[in-house]
Amino acid sequence: MSRAVSSGLMAILLATAMSGPALAQAPPARPAVTAPNYTFDSTVALLLFYVRPDKVADFEAVVGRLAQALDASTDPARRQQAAAWRMLRSSEPARDAVVYVFLLDPVVPNADYDPVRILSESLPTEVQPLYDKLKASVIRVERMALTKLR
């Protein structure tokens, strides 16, 4: 079930990023073959979440559980991720969304940063309602691998 939920979120987020907020309402029946992955080949990365202004509390509740799951993990890779994962909210107004930035610096090599996968590992009985809140709050997600210039 956790793999299906995670794959479903990735498919929804890809479809939403490619065609705007309209597709965020209805998940596809099957995961897209080209669903984004949440691993990075770079040393620094960003995940940008564009959140509906009326769903900020729901999104932040999910992010809070994600942070708790990372902090409580006994997995060495997840512990490294927790130490280098900054979760930020833009203090500048956006047009139709509140922007959240997940700064990953440094990226843990070969680690998966998929929030739903992390939640399903740590909180399997809570993952479905958390996923539902996440899906309802997110307009789109952008993924960006970065290269340090200096």
Image (cartoon, helix red, strand yellow):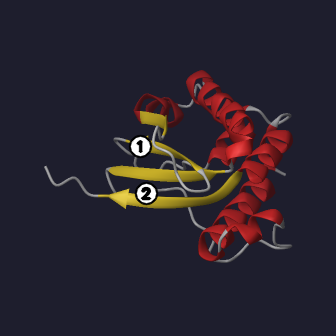
Do we see residue 41 in this rendering?
no
Q: Is residue 97 left or right of residue 134?
A: left
Q: Position of residue 63 (x, y in %)?
A: 64, 35
The image's mark for residue 119 is: none
Q: What's the amino acid at mark 2?
A: Phe
Q: What's the amino acid at mark 1?
A: Leu
The mark closer to the camera, 1 or 2, is 1
Do we see residue 25 in this rendering?
yes
Residue at numbered disc 1? 104
Residue 67, located in which quarter of the rendered image? top right
Q: Position of residue 73 (x, y in %)?
A: 60, 26
Q: Is residue 124 above or below residue 37?
A: above
Q: Position of residue 11 (x, y in %)?
A: 70, 67
Residue 53, located in which quarter of the rendered image? top right
Identified at 48% across, 36% down, the residue is: 88
Mark 2 surroundings within 10 Å by alpha-carbon count, few (fewer than 14), some (14 through 19), many (20 or more): many
Residue at numbered disc 2? 40
- Which secondary structure lies at badge 2? loop
Q: Is residue 99 left or right of residue 61?
A: left
Q: Is residue 42 above or below residue 103?
A: below
Q: Are marks 1 and 2 in contact (CB under 8 Å)?
A: yes
